[in-house]
Amino acid sequence: MDELLNRSWDVIIVGAGLGGGLCGRALAEAGLSVLFVEKGSTGPRLAENGQECGYDDPFARQMFGCWPVPVESTVDGATSVGWGAQGVGVGGTSVFYAAAMEQPERHDMESVPGLPHPTGGWPVGYDEFAPWYDRARDVMAVNGSQDPLGEPAAPLAAPRPLAARDEALGQALERAGLHPYRAHLGIRQLEGCRECIGRKCPRDCKMDGRSAGVLPALATGRAAVLDGTDALSLQGDARTVTHLRVRRDGVEHLLSARAFVLAGGSLSSPRLLLASSTDYWPDGCGNTSGLVGRGLMFHINERIAIWPPRNAPVSAPGPLKTFSLRDLYRDGPDRMGLFQSLGLPADYGNILYVLRQRYQASPFRHLRIGHELLRLPALTAAKLLGDARVFAGIIEDLPDEDNRVRHDPARPDTIIYEYRMSEELLARRLRFRKLLKRRLRGLRSLWLSHAPELNIAHPCGTLRFSDDPRQGVLDRDCKAHDLDNLFVADASFMPSSTGVNPGMTIVANALRVADAMARRLKAAP
């Protein structure tokens, strides 16, 4: 342990989740020494719990990979305190994710005829990103089928065969004039794979920050993990970060490296920069633009249950996360998003988890009995939904500098954010619902979302990249404009949220950033 604390590394990465894990793997495979600094534990390899760990104790939650303290969110002026969707530990939040690896479309990154980009376009456009998406598909073992509405793309690995009832549902969607394709998933086709949607994978089937990132990095012999370690602040001079101040087992240490990568996620990486105020960085590290923590985006979710046709045959179970559709990805000038199978059965446990998440955001959250009373409606809903498949529409969010992450020095572990839904976003949501109702006419379905629902598992944009230092925190290589050796490899860099899950873009960009870093570090004396 002393060697990890006392040596100087080529790269220190704060956070061992999806972006940090894949960035660290690429750097280690390029021959550089890498130290992952992770707040949570490595955890038992065979763990397979979900995020509903059932504990309020911070230590117990952290051991199960769940963020240890409640999140404080102020949404549309109403403040609530409850458990968030952020994970902690090796693999980060990605150990719980559904492994969706969907690539954005061209208009997500740049202006196209009839649809100007709301930010003017990303500094790195669609074609420049394309080879990194190709690389991400290989690294993440992505399987699925081609989107019939999309641009021609390289073949994917074949997905597992569908259950007969899902096959019948896909045919029903096609008869309704829709264009379903097999969802793009980062899941290896290993014998006996259970997919582990929404929970930890005890094997190496699901490709996440641990299985696809940290473990391959460790296998090179050039990487190590310092877990159970809190990153407190960065230290350095005007243009260079020299040390990361950490606390482990109650003792503070200074860790040194040639370069540093922030990969704690869009709700945590900005807080570390804001906590790093010095004489050189009076407003926080890398914050001369004043944009650190600003521009927070999520997606809005629209959940709906769809039943297979009544005469659909019964067969052995198949994969859980089945279809994606892009029929409503855009509607003229309106940016919408992906419509996809959630991959979670509408069973008692999953319904209870969702109800408890909503209860935590209600004014009655302090009444403990309410958590127990939710069991009855969860059981009733599970019986009502039966073999329905739960789908979710993603509606793209756009940046607003007033939506932001804050840092409270008195509560450094508490994630605090402020967010207001714009009238424009709410109008697009209503348009999406109207279009989807029309397209699903004739299918047995039931809306599960009524009020606007933020997808709190998809935060992004709080350290956006831009060619203009006045408009972004990072440059095109995701290096801080203000510093020569500080990089970011999580979803914070995204200037817009796109219409798909962020996982594929996080991986592609992490590999791209690692390549730029490796070239820079190898060229340095």
Image (cartoon, rainbow, N blue to C red):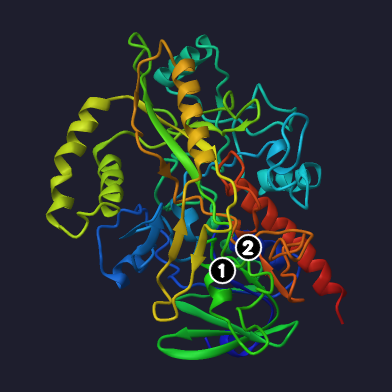
State the residue in front, 392 or 344.
Answer: 392
Specify whether residue 267 is in view. no
Is residue 158 toward the left or the right of residue 195 in the image? right
Q: Amino acid at mark 2?
A: Leu
Is residue 180 in sight in this rendering? yes
SS at badge 2: loop
Q: What is the number of the mark on residue 259?
A: none
The residue under label 1 is 270
Q: Secondary structure at mark 1?
A: helix
- If the image is split into quadrants, where does the C terminus sit? bottom right
Side (left or right) of 35 relative to 246? right
* Left or right of residue 143, residue 406 in this image: left
Residue 351, image x and y in percent? 28, 40
**Residue at the spot 78% in from the left edge and 30% down from the top edge:** 113
The answer to which of marks 2 and 1 sits earlier in the sequence is: 1
Mark 2 sits on what residue? 463
Q: Please determine whether, in this image, residue 62 is positioned above or below residue 451.
A: below
Instruction: Tell me whether the residue at label 2 lies in contact with that at label 1, contact meaning CB atoms closer than 8 angstroms.
Output: yes
**Placement of 499 over or under 433, stated as above or below:** below
The image quadrant of residue 88 is bottom left
Give me the C-alpha separation between circle 2 and circle 1: 7 Å
Q: Is residue 455 above or below residue 342?
A: below
Q: Label 1 sits on what residue type?
A: Pro
Provide residue 184's location: percent of width, then percent of height: 58, 35
* Residue at (64, 70) in percent of width and height: 290
Crowdedness near tag 2: few (<14), some (14–19) or many (≥20) residues, C-alpha within 10 Å = many
Q: Nearer the viewer, residue 43 or 179?
A: 179
Q: Position of residue 274 (x, y in %)?
A: 56, 75
Q: Nearer the viewer, residue 452 or 393?
A: 452
